Amino acid sequence: MRKYFLLSLFLFSTTLISAQQTGSVSGIAFDTISQQPIAGVTVSVLSQKDSSLISFSMTDKDGKFSITHIPNGQYRVLMTHVQYHNSNVYFAITDEQKNIHLSKIIMNDKTKVLDEVVVASEAPPVTLVGDTIQYNAGSFKTKPNANVENLLKKLPGVKVEKDGTVKAQGEKVTKVLVDGKSFFGNDPTIATKNLPADAVDKVQVFDKKSEMADMTGFDDGNTEKTINLKLKKSKKKGQFGKITVGAGNHKRFEGKFNINSFKGARQLSAIGMCNNTNAQGFSFFDILNFTGELARMQRGMNGGDININISLDDATASAMNLGGGRGGITKAWGGGINYNNIIGNKLDWQSNYFYNRLNPQKNSRILRQYILPDSTYFYNENAYTNTINNNHRINLNTLYQIDSLNSIRIIPSFSYQKTNGFSQKDYQTLTADQQRRNEGFSNAQSANEGYHFSNEILWQKKFRKPARTFSLQWQTSMNHSNGNGSLSSINKFYNPDGTIARIDSLNQINNQAGDLKSYNLRSVYTEP
């Protein structure tokens, strides 16, 4: 009971001390002329030492704000609004003064300042524009040669998981755009892992509405958490990139490059990689909707069997189960090209192509000794597994503006996969005096291939009357897969005198094929 009481007291004291080490700041933003409160002011708490962002908020309809959980230290409040000049107020959180109330913070209306007066304003680290949170990349320091992923880790409200998954405000980010354009398909990690942080001017986080909702103006509830990377003007006119190569013992190698050429609306990027260090590179399986399969391939090579299924019902997908162990060496090659441009004044073109080849291999040997109350025996096993997986994918997204009221969007996508697998294993069980009890051999082979094609055609028409629209959508999807495999094994059992008691054998051959086609026609008319 005494230990429980002391533990409870310690936990309570720790919580109390932690709470006492943080404070809060509050205040009200007022117009210098009208003396009326200002709503929608972005409030940033910055460190006086290096101007790093501690926290941020926005004033409510009454011009009030309150920011809590501020550690002890010296800070300044930066108040920013598109119609007002910036205001700074300095304060400190100490043990003696935890809760700071700044009362009225006066802001000067830009329209009331004489034209001859030029005021240089500090760019706020964070601004809230409608439903969009915009981060000023220059306010968050990163190391030289850092990529966008390193920048995102610095942003409050944004979290990057170990596998590269990005979350913003607790939601998974499913799309990363570059100046509003798709970058190598729908895998966010392609942009975050390959674009340099110093090329980014602004990071915008918002909930992207569906094409239909954008066109009609009516929210259909289909949104996805999106990050848009606005590049610096200097990066939109020129070339930049990065090349890294490395080599080590045991014939290990690794290489990676990204080259970008931007000019106005034209975006041309190429990326590539090769390694035999089990690095996943550019998360190719995410691009091909094979999420997580590489990891399963790498940890699933125990040499016992191969079971490869191809299912192409939705988008090209692969399910690979090579057993339950870990280890092995995966050789990976891959690369792709991304091209976006506005051609003429009417055609918006977005396209990308990707290829990757994965070759996981594993040699393993198992030596086990089993000690029982009345006997001892040994189990020996040698296994080898080799799989080769080739993938191609091409995406196109075009928008043609027929006139001011009519547009047509065409979105075709094609992917192809071919997989060959081989596995063999030999094993035996011996007694303590090295007498055979059983031995066997197994061999498994498989070959699978498949493709997925989808296309969407969306015609949209707006009328003179605001919010009156009509759209016609045609969707097509075709999937095909075929494969074959074989499994053979021989297992011999021995009598105590060394003679063969029995022989079990297995020979299996399987063939599979599948086709799936779907069509969908949808029309929508909206009337305000």
Image (cartoon, rainbow, N blue to C red):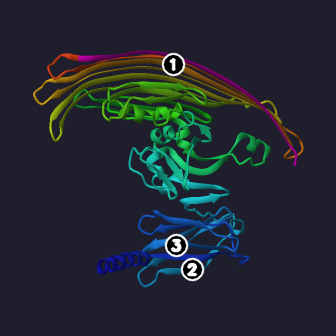
The range drawn in magenta is: 501-528
Judge left or right: residue 289 versus residue 426.
Answer: right
Residue 514 in which image quadrant: top right
Judge left or right: residue 430 versus residue 289.
Answer: left
Residue beneath label 1, please? Answer: 449
Residue type at mark 2?
Leu
**195 or 453, which is in the foreground?**
453
The reply to whether discs 3 and 2 touch (Cβ–Cβ < 8 Å) is no
- Outermost left residue: 433
Q: Position of residue 403 (x, y in %)?
A: 82, 32
Sequence-first disc among 2 and 1: 2
3D distance between C-alphas at marks 3 and 1 = 57 Å
Residue beneath label 3, please? Answer: 68
Q: Residue 259, can we see it?
A: no
Sequence-first disc among 3 and 1: 3
What residue lies at 18% left-to-right and 39% top-to-bottom?
Answer: 372
Residue beneath label 2, please? Answer: 102
Q: Against 12, is 497 above or below?
A: above
The reply to whether discs 3 and 1 touch (Cβ–Cβ < 8 Å) is no
